[in-house]
Amino acid sequence: QSWVARFASTMPSAYPRLLQPITLRGGAVLRNRALMGSMHTGLEEGEGWGHSLEKMGAFFAERARGGVGLMVTGGIAPNAAGRVAPFA
């Protein structure tokens, strides 16, 4: 059972459609109405682009396996000049 389903089972019945699929305008279908908002994890700015992207991909893949219906990703610089690093 996904974390989304476990979380929803503890919620009051005020959200009866939370785990139901929804079709967005344009035809895209989400498996549920759980949304993961945008965040900067620091993974997008690590040392070496390939290494950072691998970690960031694993981060989002884990959330997808967890059952979230829609993920809004944080920003990422297209090149080193646009980076906001260094992080503390």
Image (cartoon, helix red, strand yellow):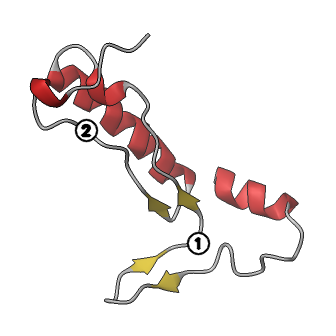
Which residue is pictured at 40% across the width and 45% down the height?
Answer: 61
Q: Quadrant of residue 19?
A: bottom right
Q: Earlier in the sequence, mark 2 or mark 1?
A: 1
Residue drawn where x is 46% and y is 41% of the image:
39
The residue tagged 2 is: 76
Residue 40 location (% of width, % of height): 42, 35
* Image position, residue 7 (x, y; %): 76, 55
Whole-angstrom CA distance, mark 2 to mark 1, is: 25 Å
Q: Quadrant of residue 84?
A: top left
User: In percent of the image, x 40 and y 43: which residue is there?
Assistant: 60
Q: Secondary structure at mark 1?
A: loop
> In this picture, is 41 found above or below 19?
above
Instruction: Please state which amino acid type lies under the numbered disc 2.
Output: Ile
Residue 5 point in image, percent of width and height = 70, 61
Decide if residue 23 is in sight here. Answer: yes
* Secondary element at tag 2: loop
